[in-house]
Image: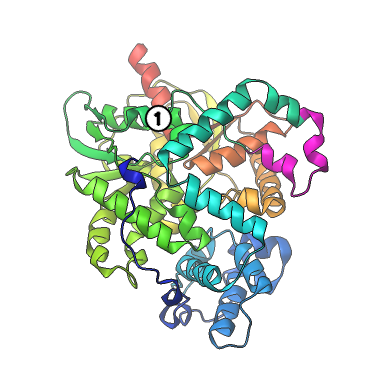
Amino acid sequence: MNAAEEKHPVAATQAAEAPQWEHYSKCIHCGLCLNACPTYRLLGVEMDSPRGRIYQMIQVEQGRLRLGKPYAHHMDLCLNCRACETACPSGVEYGRLVEAARSEIERAYRRPWAERWARKFFFDYLLPSRRRLEMAGNVLRMFQRSGLEKALLTSGVLKIMPGRMDAVARLAPRMEKPFFTDWLGRVIPASGGRRYRVAFFAGCIANLAFARLNEATVRLLARNGCEVVIPKAQGCCGALHVHAGLRDTARQLAVANITAFAREGVDAIITNTAGCGAVLKEYPILFERADREWHEPAKGFSARVKDVTEFLASIDFCQDFAPVKARATYQDPCHLLHAQRIRSAPRKLLAAIPGLDLVELKEAEICCGSAGIYNVVQNEMAERLLAAKMRRIDETGADMILTANPGCLLQLRAGVARSTQNQRRVLHVVELLDEAGRKQELT
């Protein structure tokens, strides 16, 4: 058992974690959030808007609405993209509210048995265990490389199966060998003299499906004078658990990570994943009402967390790049823009690449439909959002799509694969910066 899988004592306190008056009372029901909400924009249903969901939370607390299937449905349909927070004039922390509502649902509502089994397998058995994730990654890689996956997808069998299996199967990430787990425990020296000592948060699934992205991130940091520590004892951040209302498991994972990174003595903890970064920065919220002894350590940990674009844009970053002759557009990841409020940093970095024609994307602030595992569990809604996003991308005439979150990469690549312009490259900002920097070094 590795350190990331160790059990840390946390109390079972789900009952205390419901939406709180001090947070939902800030909502003045003005409706300015409506046009920012992806589900409301598509459905036009008040119950599927931020304002409508907050109203339902209040009704549940007051005993006027049963905490049952309809309530769970409306909360589950939310992407938790937090675009409403950006639009809100009253400072409502909607993400905190919907996550608390989902925690309350997990305590009081019994989901269908198949859903319970799937959630338990994914959230409790697979994600927290590096060993099991690697085993699953190896099996999936063999399936993909053997030709069985291609044969299954082209056979049409999945199209007659329930649950939109064909569309979901096409979202499966490609397993990249060697896995980035081989890098855990290493210290990468800075290039040209150390200016900073940073720790890299590698994630969980990203170690398998985005190994090359993680390597590019470490190289880019080293190129910018960073000694990069990659703690071996780190593990899943718990973002997907928080979004699913599984806060006790999220606390277990948070404690493991706080402990792992506390030993390193670094200037910053760097992540290249917007969803992970948002939750890492909000670890203290997990310990406000439970396991209070971890609240201060969580605050110290979160204060050092930086998205890689945020960190690089804040320093005198190396701008020695080879020209990139391409027309590109940038899609804002929801949890980078709305949760972390980072908009200018990735654009600043991209502006430093000579020759790159960066065209602003209309409605770049609207979710692409990825949203963690939303594109799997709410596939129909996610597909509608993706179709709208691809139409906006088509308008730019871009031959390169850039973003700053692995989940968005998967979703946008799926959109490109089924479009008529399927030669477009979809890259993380870090991948393009690393590519341009390495090309320049070879000239």
Residue designated by label 1: 180
Q: Does 369 appear above or below 190? A: below
Dot 1: few (<14), some (14–19), or many (≥20) neighbours within 10 Å? many
What's drawn in magenta, residue-wise?
154-171
- Is 274 placed left or right of 392 in the picture? left
Can residue 366 be spotted in the picture?
A: no
Residue 305 visible somewhere in the drawing: yes
Name the one closer to the observer, 317 or 333.
333
- Locate the N terminus and report the quarter of the image it occupies: top left
Q: Residue at x 26, y 65 (%)?
A: 295
Q: In this view, does 271 lie to the left or right of 159?
A: left
Vertical relation: 399 (above or below) 268: above
Residue at x 63%, y 81% (from the top left corner): 66
Q: Viewer-proximal residue, 363 or 4?
A: 4
The type of residue carrying mark 1 is: Phe
Judged from this view, the residue extending furthest toward the top is 443
Q: In which quarter of the image is residue 215?
A: top left
Magenta stretch contains residue 168: yes
- Return the residue nearer the eye: 254 or 379: 254
Horizontal side, residue 112 vs residue 119: left or right: right
Taking the spot 49% from the left edge, 33% from the top edge, the residue there is 135
Q: Is residue 375 above or below residue 61?
A: above
| Residue 188 colored in magenta in the image | no
Question: Percent position (x, y) of residue 334?
Answer: 51, 53
Measuring from the top left, give residue 230's x and y in whole percent: 28, 35
Count of picture labels: 1
